[in-house]
Amino acid sequence: MSDREIAELIGRVGLRDRTAFTKLYSGVSPKLFAVCLRILKDRAESEDALQEIFVRIWQRADRFAPSGTSAAGWLVAIARNHSIDRLRARRPVTDALEDRTDIADLGPDPEEASVMRGEGRRIDSCMQELDPDRAGAVKSAYVEGLTYQELAERHGVPLNTMRTWLRRSLLKLRECLDR
C-alpha cells in the first residue's frame, strides 16, 4: 500500500468511514504489529497494543495533516510511542535494567573499553581530590547503593550533613571532570 493510499484512507477515517478503516487496518496492521512486537517483545501484549493503537487512529485520524508528513510514518510513530508508553508502564526502569543479562554478556568492544578505562582514570583522579571521608561516602552511595541514612550512620554524622557532603562532592567532581 502506497503512502498516498494510506493518507487517503486516513482522511476518510477522519470522516468516520468504517470501510476505509477496515482497509487501513488490513493494509498497515502487519507493519504496526511488527513495530509493537519489536518494542514490547511479547506477542499477546503487542496484539493488545495494536488494538489500542487502532482506537487512537480512529479517534485522531481527523488530526492528520498530509502535507509534508508521511502517512505511514505518522502511523508508525503512533504505534512506536504507544508501545514505549506500555513498556514504561509495565515496570520501573531499574527493574528493566537489572533483567538485561545480555548487556553484560556482550561486553564492550575494544574502543568502548578504552574510552571507559580513560573515563575511569579521570574519575579516580578527581575522586582523589576529595577528602577521604567524602570520597568514601560518594563511592558507597553511587557504587554500593547505600542510602543517605546508612551513610550518615556509617560516618557518624547527621543525615543533613551527609546530604551536604554528597552534594558538594558531586559538584566538585563535576567541576573536575569538566576541566
Image (cartoon, rainbow, N blue to C red):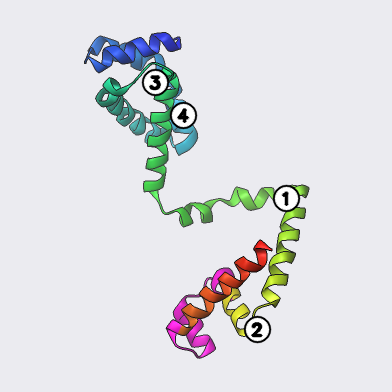
Mark 1, residues whose alpha carbon is within 10 Å: few (<14), some, or many (≥20)? few
Q: Which residue is mark 2?
A: 132
Label 2 amino acid? Answer: Pro
Answer whether residue 20 is visible to the viewer in this image.
yes
Q: Quadrant of the N terminus?
A: top left
Instruction: For marks 2 and 1, give the CA distance.
Output: 30 Å
Label 4 amino acid? Answer: Val
Label 3 amino acid? Answer: Ser
Residue 149 at what x, y percent from top left? 44, 81
Disc 2 or 1, which lies upstream in sequence? 1
Q: Quadrant of the C terminus?
A: bottom right
Q: Left or right: where does residue 109 sit relative to residue 11?
A: right
Disc 4 or 1, which lies upstream in sequence? 4
Q: Which mark is residue 112?
A: 1
Is label 3 in contact with label 2 (beta carbons under 8 Å)?
no
Q: Is residue 152 above or below residue 118?
A: below
Instruction: For marks 4 and 2, give the CA distance.
Output: 50 Å
Q: Is residue 92 above or below residue 18?
A: below
Q: Which mark is residue 29?
A: 3
Residue 37 at what x, y percent from top left? 46, 32
Residue extending farthest to the bottom is 156
Q: Is residue 40 magenta?
A: no
Residue depicted at x 52% and y 53%:
97
Q: Main secondary structure of the magenta part?
A: helix
- Does dot 2 land on a helix, a strand or a loop? helix
Disc 3 or 2, which lies upstream in sequence? 3
